[in-house]
Each structure stands twice: as C-alpha cells, then as structure tokens.
Amino acid sequence: MARSRGQQATLADVAQLAGVSVATASKALNARGEVAPGTRARVINAAERLSFQPNVLARSLISGRTRTIGLLTDELGGRFSIPVLLGAENVLGSENMAVLLCDARGDAIRRQHYIRTLLARQVDGFIVVGDRNDIHPSITHDVPVPVVYVYGESTDPADISLLSDDEGGARLAIDHLVSHQRRHIAHITGPESFRAARSRVAGASAALAAHGLSWANGEPLFGEWSQRWGRHTARHLVMAHPEIDALFCGNDQIAAGAAQALREMGRMVPHDVAVVGYDNWEDLAADCQPPLTTVDLNLQDLGAAAVTRLLDAIAGRPHSGVIRHPCRLVVRESTAPTVGRTATA
C-alpha cells in the first residue's frame, strides 16, 4: 500500500490493512458496540501502524459537535484566568477537545462580539471566567449551548457557577496563625466593594470568634489591592497597636508591602509579627522577604472542574447552583513558629 511521502493515511487505508470494510473500520475506531473485540483490535493496530489521524471535520459533521469550547474572560493578562485556562486545557486535552480563548477586557460590546464569533465557530459550550470571584450577568439565555461560570457567579440561580471558597480560605489563615500562638491579629484588605474582600473578612472574623478572639485593632481595614496600601497601613497599625503579633492580608501584594514596612520598623517577620497573604501569586509570594505564607485558590482545579461540569451539560446532564471549591494554605517562612516568646491572651 504505497503512499507518497507526507501523504496522510485515510480510513480506507486502515480498513484495507485490517482486512475489513470502511464502515467496520469507522465503527471500530469510534468505539461502536457492534464490532467484535478481535476485529476492533486489528483495526486499532492498523491505525497505529499507519499513524492514522481521524478527520475531525468529518467526525463533527457526523456527531453534530465540533469538540471545541469557547472560553470568555475579562482579564487574560491577570493572575486568575491563566491558571483556570491551564486546568481546563488539562481536561480538554484528555478528551481530544480544543479551546478558543477570547478576552473581552471588561468591554460589554467586545464581549457580545466574541459571543457571536464563538457561536459562528459552532462551539459546543462556553466557559465564562470572572475576574474577581464576584457576581456577573448571565449570558445563558443568549446562547444555544451550555454555559459554565467559573471564578464568578452568574446572576441566574439556574446556572452552574464554580467559585473559590474565600471564607474557607480565610479560616485556614486564621487557624494557622492561632496554632502558632498568635493572639493579636489584624486584617488589611482591599476595597469593600469586592465580594472576595468581604467574604475573606467574614471567614476570618468567624474563625477568630471560634477561638475566642477579636481583631487586635477592633475591625478589618479595607483599602487597595496594593503594596503601597500594605506598607502604609501596617506601619500605622503597629505604631498604634504595638501588641499586634500577626497580620492577615487580603492578597499577596498587601502582604508584601506589610512585610516591607515591618522590616523598616525593625520588627522581625515572623518572630515579632507573622504575615499571611492570599492568592499565592508565586512570583511575588516566593520572592518576598521572608517568603510569604499564603492561601492558594486552586484555580487549576477550578478550571478542570468547570470543564467536567460543561461536558456533563453537553451530554445532557446539566448542573445548577453555586459550588465553592476549597482553597489550600501554602506555608512559607513568614509564619514560622515563634521562638523565645510567650503568647498572651
């Protein structure tokens, strides 16, 4: 069966080598049940010998599916969409599916353009990635294919939304600090308008109360997601409340700024004041002095779970409601156990 160099094997080539009809070869390669095991094995072996690659377009015409997913995000350049995408791709790759990525950049007109573009490509479903674990408008009624929302909650309770458990992550941080004998804990976080900031405050406050503690300075401090805010606020907090022995920060940028301010004030981290961040932005957290203990959002797992839910919906098994995925604590040197200190209640 001579073929010219570079010529791709066809299904007819596979059938001829296996000694079966083209129809039988097609059924065998598509795992149809009416083919005998021995025949299926012979066809698969022939396909492997010929390096046969199925015609994806032909398969899509037969199945009515293109085996592509549209992923719509508002912050491709940020820290959240890429890990979600990587997790999604891990599952899609194992399913021999592809993803078409579109970045709306927070622009409603651009978003509608990309929705139309993806529908024109006949994607089998959408994954909509949020930029702040917040509530976003549903697009489900505007598209004829299943939609899953990840790192952002749809306004429609009938949709399926997958979020990071910010309250649970904050509880991990507080429990960790208390386990290291920290009793005078303050919280510096981002804008109160962010749902993530409010959820982390709620989780941390509940954890403190469960340990019979309250915030060292009376209340959490809302501000900016910035190192500048972390530096400025940590300096004023510790001057006003010198008994503070731990800072739980709403993200890693704030935590890095706080750690810098403490060093400049002559406070040793973690001996005098332990510091915990949030997000596990590795480039920042690992390079901080000292490296930051922080809460990881497990965004790759979130992306993988979103694809699994979407594949269920495509197969006719849709889900609804809100699922909060657990975070994990990444322990580094900024919260090492205290040495030579006696904690006071």
Image (cartoon, rainbow, N blue to C red):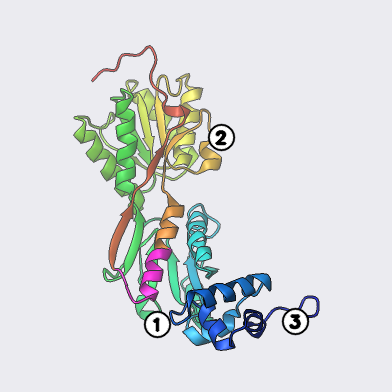
Give the residue displayed 62% in from the left and 79% down from the top: 18
Q: Earlier along the polypeptide chain: callout 2 or callout 1? A: 1
Which of 173 and 235 lies nearest the eye of the viewer?
173
Distance, label 1 to label 3, CA atoms, is: 45 Å
Give the residue displayed 75% in from the left and 81% down from the top: 1
Please provide percent x and percent y for residue 340: 38, 11
Q: In this figure, which residue is indicated by the disc labeled 1?
A: 144
Give the residue displayed 46% in from the left and 77% down from the top: 124
Please provide percent x and percent y for residue 331: 43, 33
Residue 234 sits above or below residue 39 on the image? above
Q: Earlier along the polypeptide chain: callout 2 or callout 3? A: 3
Residue 78 sits above or below residue 274 on the image? below
Callout 3: SS: loop
Q: Quadrant of the C terminus?
A: top left
Which of 161 and 251 lies nearest the eye of the viewer?
161
Segment colored magenta? 307-319
Mark 2 and mark 1 residues within 8 Å of each other at the beta carbon: no
Q: Is residue 313 magenta?
A: yes
Q: Looking at the rendered structure, which numbered label has been put on residue 287?
A: 2
